[in-house]
């Protein structure tokens, strides 16, 4: 009898859902809006209702469903308990218990960045490796650490929160987390933009970035066109990220490092700026690490959520 | 039927051996010299012979031995294969297979610092926590990361090599690993001594350290006596170690941090210098971490080796 698994990725505005077979083939995917009103109390019932409908539509019996995996933006511990997810309005409660109660199928939940890392290991840029650092360079910097094929969740679900590793003592602006000098302030899309704007202000030097829109995309486009100011920004980005990845590798000794998120759309050129700093400062036992780009894009979360359920219940 | 387990900690000059019951009570411990001649080929046979003798002496039947755990100084992967241990003269081979072949009981092996961390979790300063950072501040800086009760071994056995995390760009001396600016250069016994000697040379300032022997012990003794130069050294030590532990915590989100090794004999005062930097720069999800001192001393390795076997075979 063939079996099925659902992967759910809850974001601040939309919930992505995927139906997979147990081999990880994506059979169907769709989205629903995230209703964050009333402390997000509609979110899980909405998801349950949609999964229920899909089960009926596809004429799947509940016995054929291995389970439902959920990724959500917040610290979520090994028991599937979320410890406040501000973007969703959630406090502390068990996602697992709540959704199992409604759906009557096994549920497991994890932090969205961690779950996406598991997805990239299973079917994306990290395939073939079971010890992995996945860095998501988006508006912020998210991360997922995979150790021996499993998510490193940590004591309170804050494992892999690498965007908030302190990398610079001399920073005057405050990060979203309240600290100063976090990796996220230099290596996210916002961070790259900030570095570029700072550099543009520092001098009157000519640059393709002057006058136009400054974003991670325009910066790396200018890098590719040989713009010297943009190249300096890329060097700075590479130094912060490469050194920080070297430190993380000193802890976890990965087989591969996967770069994802919006900034990674710049492509292989990113690796060119990160790798020299990584290799210079990493412990020799982790020097020969494979750098690659994430391949699942916005689907990494639903893949990883499905994998989380398979690992837990299959 | 009561059961037994052996814990073996191989050092460069002596091998420590312990006989435990499965509850972790140390029933007997002893040492033998480490014969490193002829590429260390006598080491495992020597250990096997000694264990064999102990089994006969204590009239234990082999069926009552759960297994033998081994910690050794080098990267050792999840399969019990060592990837070169220079201090022992070892190349690449399976410690597990070699010793099982001679002893005919189950064997598991791990890196000595990692295994010691497991020991501190089981019966030492980390009791009650299953997500742990153990830092050994000795001649070098060793580390062991425990995730969900298990050693973080990494892809090639270099997990937890935190002494070689790069923490300083402006360093002119080379670390034993070949890099520059490793944590070990500032937070080990040798590192603290180096920081103190540098500071003594920089000025003519009065200090209790001037003229006498400078060591981690004399530095922290001077700190306790209120010596201002020594206090500056402790501040520097605390800044490097506190910031680095904050970065590690950003990766693994521990429940507790345990400080061991010779430097930790200075006592609680160490924590006073480390904690402010840790708390300032760590991600809030890992801010409320318990700092404690290792309690097993040189026995941590045999305890951890025994625990490794129990976790693998019991």
Image: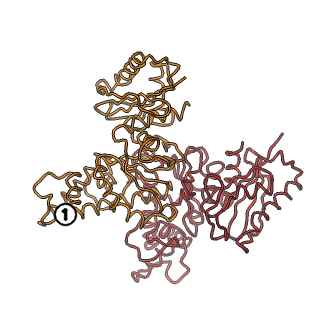
Chain colours: A orange, B red
Residue count near mark 1 (Cα–Cα under 10 Å), binned few <14, some 14–19, many ≥20: some
Residue B287 in view: no
A225 vs A248, nearest the viewer: A225
Tell me: B248 left or right of B122: left
Q: Quadrant of the N terminus of chain B?
A: top right
Is residue B246 shown above or below A296? below
Is residue B205 shown above or below A47? below
Residue at the (46%, 67%) spot, across then down:
B182
Residue A13 location, quadrant: top left
Label tally: 1
Residue A167 in view: yes
Which residue is label 1 attached to? Answer: A227
Residue A291 location, quadrant: bottom left
Q: Quadrant of the C terminus of chain B?
A: top right
Subunit under mark 1? A
Residue at the (70%, 72%) spot, across then down:
B39
Is residue A282 shown above or below B312? below
| Place of residue B90 in the rendered image (x, y in percent of width and height, measured from the top left) | 67, 68
Tell me: B1 left or right of B277: right
Residue at the (29%, 46%) spot, across then down:
A262
A127 vs B126, nearest the viewer: A127
Residue at the (44%, 78%) spot, across then down:
B198
| Place of residue A223 in the rendered image (x, y in percent of width and height, measured from the top left) | 23, 60
B162 vs A49, nearest the viewer: A49
| Place of residue B125 in the rendered image (x, y in percent of width and height, measured from the top left) | 60, 52
| Place of residue B116 in the rendered image (x, y in percent of width and height, measured from the top left) | 63, 56
Tell me: B127 left or right of A43: right
Tell me: A17 left or right of B155: left
Badge 1 element: loop
């Amino acid at each position: 009898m063939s079996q099925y698994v659902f992967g759910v990725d809850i974001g601040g505005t939309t919930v992505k859902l995927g139906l997979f077979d147990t081999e990880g083939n994506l059979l169907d995917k769709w989205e629903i809006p995230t209703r964050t009103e009333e402390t997000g109390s509609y979110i899980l019932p909405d998801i349950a209702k949609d999964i229920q409908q899909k089960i009926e539509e596809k004429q799947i019996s509940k016995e054929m469903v291995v389970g439902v995996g959920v990724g959500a933006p917040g610290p979520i511990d090994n028991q599937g308990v979320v410890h406040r997810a501000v973007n969703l309005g959630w406090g502390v409660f068990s996602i697992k218990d709540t959704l199992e109660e409604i759906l009557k199928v096994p549920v497991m939940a994890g932090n969205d960045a961690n779950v996406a890392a598991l997805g990239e290991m299973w079917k994306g840029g990290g395939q073939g490796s079971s010890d992995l650092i996945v860095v998501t360079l988006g508006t912020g910097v998210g991360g997922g650490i995979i150790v021996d094929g499993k998510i490193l969740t940590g004591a309170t679900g804050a494992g892999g929160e690498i965007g908030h590793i302190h990398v610079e003592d001399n920073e005057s602006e405050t990060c979203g987390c309240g600290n100063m000098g976090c990796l996220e302030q230099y290596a996210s899309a916002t961070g790259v933009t900030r570095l570029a704007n700072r550099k543009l202000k520092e001098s009157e030097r000519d640059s393709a970035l002057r006058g136009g829109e400054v974003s991670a995309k325009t910066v790396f486009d200018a890098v590719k066109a040989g713009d010297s100011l943009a190249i300096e920004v890329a060097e700075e980005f590479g130094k912060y990220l490469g050194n920080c990845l070297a430190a993380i590798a000193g802890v976890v000794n990965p087989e591969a490092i996967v770069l994802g998120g919006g900034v990674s759309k710049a492509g292989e050129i990113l690796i060119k700026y990160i790798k020299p700093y990584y290799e210079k400062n990493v412990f020799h036992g982790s020097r020969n690490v494979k750098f690659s780009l994430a391949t699942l894009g916005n689907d990494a979360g639903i893949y990883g959520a499905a994998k989380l359920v398979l690992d837990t219940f299959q």
